[in-house]
């Protein structure tokens, strides 16, 4: 039996156990199940639109800076290619070093701005956190006032809110640990 088959079987058993536990727990709860459309919230909630505009403006500035740095690298490379036959070895090395330096600056800027954990990611989290906190507060209020036990996000199929008693994570972990 291959490792892939074992992994698939473990995943299937985990999923089956989770669904059985969730179904049993959900059936024992009285309440409603609902969903939200997070894309509609993003487009229709003015505060989201304002934050998106601010994010897009900063993104455009960073993209402009990246384009400018790239243009500099391309220009230096083009000049070097056109003049390399006429340059002394010393001048060639000097220009090659300058091109490498500018390439490094460009790569560094792109990674810092757009890479994982970069400025773009941090700004997005900083701008959206207060709005997401508000949305979660509203979800909880609606859920508790209207007896919803689970609220799903229709866009990506994730749970947007659920009663604390429906979280089966610890129970599943206990069962998994027993299997070891």
Image (cartoon, rainbow, N blue to C red):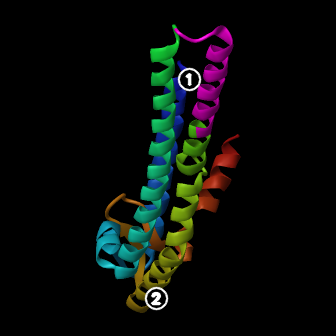
Q: Specify the segment rendered in magenta.
A: 86-105
The percent coordinates of residue 80 (x first, y second) are 51, 19
Out of 3 and 82, give the one closest to the viewer.
82
For marks 1 and 2, the one nearer the N-term is: 1
Q: Residue at x 42, y 57 (%)?
A: 60
Q: Residue at x 57, y 69 (%)?
A: 126
The percent coordinates of residue 179 (x first, y second) are 66, 42
| Numbered badge on residue 150 | none
Is residue 104 magenta-colored? yes
Compared to residue 170, the image places residue 33 above or below, namely below
84 sits to left or right of 176: left
Q: Which quadrant: the C terminus?
A: top right
Is residue 49 magenta-colored? no
- Pointer 1 residue: 3
Out of 61 and 86, give the one closest to the viewer.
86
The percent coordinates of residue 11 (x first, y second) are 50, 40
Kindly check if marks 1 and 2 are in contact, taking CB atoms under 8 A apart as contact: no
- Considering every residue shown, the one lying at the far bottom of the view is 145
Compared to residue 162, the image places residue 157 above or below, namely above
* Marks 1 and 2, how far apart at CA: 46 Å
- Pointer 2 residue: 141
Regarding mark 2 in the picture, which secondary structure is present there? helix
146 sits to left or right of 108: left
The percent coordinates of residue 47 (x first, y second) are 40, 80
Q: Residue at x 48, y 68 (%)?
A: 25
Q: Residue at x 49, y 54 (%)?
A: 62
Which is closer to the viewer, label 1 or label 2?
A: 2
By secondary structure, the bulk of the magenta-drawn segment is best described as: helix
33 sits to left or right of 74: left
Please rate how many residues cluster around mark 2, counting C-alpha atoms within 10 Å: few if below 14, some from 14 to 19, many from 20. few
Regarding mark 1 in the picture, which secondary structure is present there? helix
132 sits to left or right of 177: left
């Amino acid at each position: 039996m291959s490792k892939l088959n074992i992994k698939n079987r473990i995943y299937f058993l985990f999923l089956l156990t989770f669904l059985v536990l969730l179904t049993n727990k959900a059936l024992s709860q009285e309440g409603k199940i609902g969903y939200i459309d997070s894309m509609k919230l993003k487009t229709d909630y003015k505060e989201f639109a304002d934050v998106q505009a601010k994010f897009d403006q900063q993104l455009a500035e960073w993209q402009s800076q990246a384009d400018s740095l790239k243009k500099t690298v391309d220009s230096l490379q083009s000049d070097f290619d056109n003049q390399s036959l006429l340059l002394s070895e010393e001048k060639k090395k000097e220009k090659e070093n300058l091109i490498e330096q500018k390439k490094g600056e460009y790569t560094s800027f792109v990674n810092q701005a757009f890479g994982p954990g970069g400025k773009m990611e941090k700004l997005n989290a900083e701008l959206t956190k207060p709005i997401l906190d508000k949305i979660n507060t509203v979800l909880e209020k609606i859920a508790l006032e209207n007896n919803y036990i689970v609220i799903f996000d229709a866009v990506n199929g994730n749970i947007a809110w659920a009663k604390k008693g429906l979280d089966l994570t610890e129970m599943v972990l206990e069962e998994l640990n027993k299997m070891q």
